[in-house]
Image (cartoon, rainbow, N blue to C red):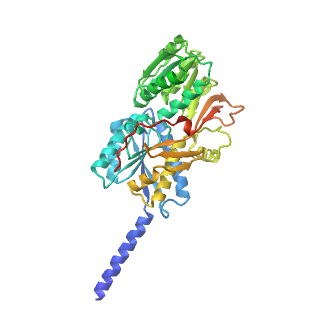
Amino acid sequence: MVWNLLRCIAVLSLAWLSNSVGADEDIRIAVIEPYTGPSAGVGKWFTDHVRMAVDRLNASGGLLGGRHVRIETFDSKSNPQEAIVALNSISDKGIGFVFGTTGSNIAIALNEAITKHNARDPSSPILFLNHGALASELTNESCSYWHFRFGANSDMQVMGVIRYIAQQKEIKSVYLLNQDYAYGQAVQRLMRELLAQQRPDIKLVGDELVPLQKTKDFAPYVSKIRSSGSNAVLTSFWGQDLNLLMKAAHDFGMSSRFFTVHAHLFGGPAAIGETGAGRLVNLATWHANVANTPLADYASDFRKQYKEDWNYLPAKAAVEMWARAVSAAASTDTIKVAKALEGSRYDAGTGQLWMRPDDHQLSMPLFLGTFMKVGPGVQNPAEDTGFGFRTEARLEAEATTLPTRCKMERP
């Protein structure tokens, strides 16, 4: 009898200990970004944005009764195959949440692989919280229940830029220049379509796709743009392609205005500098000169900690909305968290964000800003350049939201 009593006490003690460990166990999330290669700077910068949001979350008490969130990073090397290798490792570790990622080609591969994995092994599904890859197909033709996007997709970006251009009556001709991969191709198609709809009088004098991050000298492209007589260039270039393009344009003394959507990304302002002053117009989810912004202290704290500019709202929104969904679900169960995310609304610092249930695309305000020397409207320079973005327009979410082509299959 004494033996049975001791055995019961031991079993109860082990159960209590197991529950206690479970309550204190970290919630692990994976971040897949390029940490080597030409996009390594952007990959680290995106990761720092996620880390900042996670640190704030942990400092406020964590989730589910005090559990902290722990980040594990994986290098995609800007290669879809390497990203799949990373995903396999994430699956083996039993991590259920993947944040990222730089490059729509990477995200498309991950989206497909995660969807297949979850169909094969429904007992341990993975959720993809995408804040960096913006190809429209990810929330249209290739939409998945397991994928949520927290950045404005390429359709939303192009809609915002074209709406602004439509009001600039001095623009009579444009040249399209995009990168030759899924995201750039999607942007190219929609640019053509929306220009024809909203400004049929504008003459399209050039339309090219450029190999992604492989061109070292953009002088030949700039020469063609200049010869075309274009007074505006529309481009979705990012990273070194955008930086080198702007340098070549400056060297050629081009007077055309450049309309972009990625000039604010890490390294962009510093590389562009005075070459873009007064003629580069950029669309973003936030910039440091947005009037009356509640995010000024957040951006300042980020700069003190990471010695980089903070301006990428989607990463903050992804972490905070995911955390709210975990709390609402009272669980880290992937399906329960996904259900809590669908239709959720949240203000991450710029106004109401809405995760559309139909396609898991976040709807959000956007800002157009001209790159200008510090002065009226530009009190906060980007990357210590002496230049920053002056707000030209705030676009409410309704102005850039388009119908979805998603036909989602639900578990």
In the picture as drawn, the residue positioned furthest to the right comes out as 376
Q: Visible in this render: residue 261?
A: no
Q: Position of residue 289 (x, y in %)?
A: 65, 37
Q: Tell me the quarter of the image containing the N terminus.
A: bottom left
* In the image, residue 102 above or below residue 273: below
Q: Which one is in front, 368 or 191?
A: 191
Q: How many marks?
A: 0
395 on left or right of 54: right
Residue that appears at 39% across and 57% down: 333
Determine whether 31 is above or below 391 in the image. below
User: Whole-percent x and y of residue 23?
Assistant: 44, 65
Relative depth, front residue between 111 and 395: 395
Residue furthest out toward the top: 227
In the image, residue 44 sits, relative to residue 268, either above or below, namely below
Look at 44% across and 25% down and name the residue there.
189
Q: Nearer the viewer, residue 61 or 359?
A: 359
The x, y position of residue 72, in whole percent, is 42, 50
Front residue of this view, candidates 261 and 30: 261
Would residue 208 be seen by someone viewing this image from the given angle? Answer: yes
- Residue in the image at 55% along x and 38% along y: 398
Residue sticking out furthest to the bottom = 1
Q: Which quadrant would residue 275 be assigned to in this image?
A: top right
Q: Residue 105, how many percent across, how many down? A: 39, 34
Residue at image position (50%, 48%) is: 51
Q: Is residue 115 above or below residue 196?
A: below
